[in-house]
Amino acid sequence: MPAHEGHQGHEQHPGRRAYDAVIVGGGHNGLVAAAYLARAGRSVLVLERLDHTGGAAVSTRPFTGVDARLSRYSYLVSLLPGKILRDLGLDVRLQGRTISSYTPVERGGRPTGLLVGGGEERTRAQFARLTGGDGEYAAWERFYGMTGHVARRVFPTLTEPLPSRDELRRRVDDEEAWRTLFEEPVGIAVEERFADDLVRGVVLTDALIGTFADAHDPSLKQNRCFLYHVIGGGTGAWDVPVGGMGALTDALAAAARDAGAVLATGHEAVRVDTDGRTAEVTYRTADGEGVVEARHVLVNASPQTLAALTGDEPPAPAEGAQLKVNMLLTRLPRLRDSSVDPREAFAGTFHIAEGYEQLAAAHAQAAAGELPAAPPSEIYCHSLTDPSILGPDLVARGYQTLTLFGLHTPARLFERDNDAVREELLRTTLAQLDAHLAEPLADCLATDADGRPCIEARTPLDLERDLGLPGGNIFHRDLAWPYAGEGTGRWGVETRHANVLLCGAGAVRGGGVSGVPGHNAAMAVLETPAGTEI
């Protein structure tokens, strides 16, 4: 059986009748909140439905008899503030990637591509090789100079009370940047600043990860997605957690437990009753039901789950739009573009079928109810950055992991036959990759102990079933601007119930492996007096 390697709960029972805070869901945000509150002296209970904590941020051995620990669902870290790591004393190492991205393309009948990374001069030469001049690289430097300025101004606000829109605008202090990122569809900036189709596509992809939108979507949900992808750490860099994502959530679970929080796995919260001052949380286990009292309830789950627990009107349905594929290879495949070493090409983000026009065509086809003919995707090889996720024997034999994230595949496309559509989409997605390889990817796939290829794919419907993600949406709902709006509350975690907070990805400033909603929910609780022990 594949092994789940989220942190196994040491405390299987609540142990007492009442707590200062009950946290529903033991994903990374719930664990962050638990650690902060327990360290502040509050009594804390975490109720986790599964037999392990970690939620979507876990490491797993998905292939039978193979010693490879993959970050199965979420896999890169950018939005986790160093403040949280320091505050909680977490012994977690985030390893940067020397290569940012590689995007293969065929031009003039020959294979070529764009490698970004390895130093300024090398990247400049790569742009010139692809585009025939220095204009696109100069535009690239100006554009990401602008986003870097915004990142340095905005990222520190994520762990502060929500600024107003005007306050954040003053903090950004760059009207061109504000208009480009916060007011106009990002497609305008991409088309005005860049001329090359492939360069345009590489820029746009950060606006589409897990977000089904066109570059010119008037809702600007693509802008919000882009913003969160370029502000992380004040730099926009995306790092690999050494030891896999499970190493991070294991450290969080240990920090919470060491501070006195009780982690009760196998306990599914089924109802929250509250009068705004105290609450009762009903939970279900294999042995029956129980009830625990709380002064505060923090829900580390989707807004839909929150509504179901409290009996409130549920929000509009969410929809995910990604294909997630995990693979183990005996070796990295050779590229048709022989000027690039596969160990560099796959070390960063390997873009497939993500030219600007390709992305637009794929979105239009999916919006019309069809699978994209050329599904766009991006691929990462984490074992190049962190070989520790593979057993020593696999490392010695040159094995590597590959993770693929497909775009523009909304959940609605899978409703007619999830299994059949998954297989069709996987086949056409890998065919897009094979078009840029000098050998078929299938020839490089490892096999498990039963002789099956080491590859697994997950659709939005699979993620909804496995993780409770509404519609398979990795952000739980459309991302929100990181400033206050109507009904957002002081920290962006408040609900209509005074003592019930939302600390999952659906909170304002949620999404990604950040811990920000967990931190902010804990801060909201700690602003209220501890009061009398209950």
Image: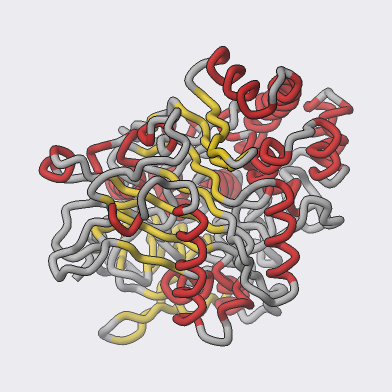
Quick check: 496 left or right of 250?
A: right
Colouring mode (rainbow / by chain / secondary structure / one colour) = secondary structure
Report which quarter residue 326 is drawn in.
bottom left
Question: Residue 379 location in percent, x, y?
Answer: 46, 48
Measuring from the top left, give residue 12's x and y in whole percent: 24, 67
Q: Position of residue 514 (x, y in %)?
A: 51, 44
Can residue 374 be seen at all in this image of the molecule? yes
Residue at the top extreme?
A: 121
Taking the image as shown, residue 54 lies to the left or right of residue 364, namely left
- Specify whether 380 is left or right of 528: left
At x 45% / y 41%, what residue is drawn? 336
Q: Position of residue 64 (x, y in %)?
A: 18, 65
Q: Residue at x 28, y 57 (%)?
A: 60
Residue at x-position 41% and y-position 66%: 457
Q: Quadrant of the C terminus?
A: bottom left
- Observer-nearest of 116 and 498: 116
The quarter of the picture where residue 218 lies is: bottom right
Q: Compared with residue 187, is residue 56 higher up or lower down, i.e. above or below?
A: below
> Which image quarter is the N terminus in?
bottom left
Question: Dividing the picture into quarters, in which one does residue 267 lie?
Answer: bottom left
**Nearest the camera: 28 or 492?**
28
Q: Is residue 385 left or right of residue 511?
A: left
Count of marks placed on residues: 0
Is residue 249 something one can see in this rendering? Answer: no
Q: Is residue 242 above or below residue 439?
A: above
The residue drawn where x is 60% and y is 44% is 527
